[in-house]
Image (spheres, grey):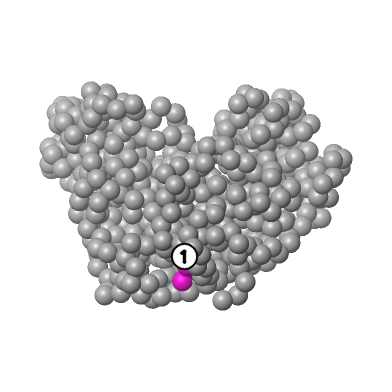
Amino acid sequence: MDPIQVTVNGEVRTAGAAGPHTNLLDWLRGEGFTGAKEGCAEGECGACAVLVARPEPDGTTRWVSVNSCLPPALAFDGQEVVTSEGLGRAPGACAVADLHPVQKEMAERGGSQCGYCTPGFVCSMAAEYYRPDRTPVEGDGDAQTGPAAVGDDHNTHAADHEHGPNGFDLHAMSGNLCRCTGYRPIKDAAYALGRPDDSDALARRRTAPAPAARPTRLRTDTGEFVRPASLAELLERLAADPDAVLVAGATDAGVERNIAHRRPPLVLAIDRLEELRGLEIDDDHIELGAALTLTEIETRLAGRIPLLADLFPQFASRLIRNGATLGGNLGTGSPIGDAPPVLLALDASVLLASAAGERDVPLAEYFTGYRESVRTPGEIIRSVRIPLPLAPHAAFYKIAKRRFDDISSVAVAIAAVVEQRTDGGSLTRVRIGLGGVAATPIRARATEDALAGRPWTADVAREAAAIMATEGTPLDDHRASARYRASMLEQALLKFYEENHASPALEVTR
């Protein structure tokens, strides 16, 4: 095998001494890049954020921000990483003229106080700064030097409260926490950024292809890390070692390593296997590769599946979505995962693959118990299939203590087809997925039965909502009481009725 190397801030560094269980953050800090820091070690605070070069479908490169405390350092063999130290035009310089535009705006607008979180904020902001489809709205100011300060008369009409007049999406920083500034100066800095100029090396880098993944193998006294060259090699290795831990974005496995100190003997990296990264659309279904990140799916679908479009902004943070995958979210089998209720409502199935072959399993039959499924040893989730056409009436409701970047107390996804009749509408088909109310994500089958084929009226909705309050086995815990969860189930269906029973903008089948 070739030496294990990672390009950091333009310089190639050998990473073979990292070990299979060393995360990217610890390796970077050991190499002297101490801007990124450990805060929570769970991917919730963003103090560890760095930039990574990732491929675009058109062959160019996108700078993506990730939590470096979660993925293994060896997963970046042959890849390019930029830390906060690498953003400045003159490494180690202190003059304002040598700062990156993001760093300059953060400094001038008071976006840093204690400074602990600042490098992570800077990297997340830089990823959004370099987003190729970030489009300023009218009145954004000079495209090279940036708009006037937020609050200036000509610069107060951002598209909405989460997007700046320069097109900056505040969700880019939803995974970064700061205890000092109150966020307003950080928001000001974000909204003051213009477009990268022609001298910006990282902007020019986007026009070339991202580095391809390459096979990696390292064995030490503490374990073994392998990035297979193909799906066939992965399945062969998994057949021999069915207890191996699969890692894509490591948004779950990384937490287990950091907090629970789990050290599996064998780690198999699957995040860059092309056979797991397809996205295909035909007349009958949409197939999503299990190793595509949620951000990649969101970007490439561009709202084609509205229920997924509702899910993505509420799924953790942008930093997490840049690494997390549908395969990982389903593979862990968590009863509070946000994706399963949505996929259940979409009537999705999972394509399972092993050395013995492949099989297609309806997601409603996939979960068998708490963090258990029908997957057999040596079997992986290859893709998720969503049948077409989609139900025209759909909604996702996530009940949590925070609007974003939080674990749900209850998650409800509903997809319905309404047939137009002379006496009003009738539900001809409804699928309801629930999370957080049982040992597994479940279909609300009793509620579905109470709705299917019946008039879509307020009385029917109230009757079905009362049934939905009894679905699952809600419990009392620190996130919510059983009574609260039951009430939220009932209210979710009533809300869905209010939003969908008489809207002229919604399509019905004839």
Q: Residue at x 52, y 41 (%)?
A: 41
> Image quadrant of residue 493?
top left
Rendering quarter of residue 413: top left
Q: Where does the N terminus fall, quadrant-wise? A: bottom right
**Left or right position of 167 against 378:** right
Q: Is residue 328 visible?
A: yes
Name the quadrant containing residue 243. Answer: bottom left
Relative image position of residue 367 (x, y in whole percent): 23, 51
Range of residues picked out in magenta: 224-228
| Residue 294 lies within the magenta run | no
Query: What main secondary structure does the magenta stretch of the protein show?
Result: strand
Q: In the rendering, at what x and y percent does residue 322 appear?
A: 52, 50
Identity of the amino acid at label 1?
Answer: Glu
The image position of residue 166, as x and y in percent, is 68, 39
Which residue in the structure is indicated by mark 1?
224
Residue at x-position 48% and y-position 54%: 249
Horizontal and vertical percent position of residue 400: 38, 30
Residue at horizontal 19%, vertical 40%? 444
Q: Using the image, determine if residue 17 lies above or below residue 96.
A: below
Pick whichever, 278 or 438, lies toward us.
438
Q: Is residue 28 left or right of residue 450?
A: right
Q: Does residue 292 appear in the picture of this structure? A: no
Tell me the crowding category of disc 1: few under 14, some 14 to 19, or many 20 or more residues within 10 angstroms, Cα based: some
Secondary structure under tag 1 reads strand
Q: Is residue 437 above or below residue 13?
A: above
- Residue visible at 57% across and 30% down in the picture: 161
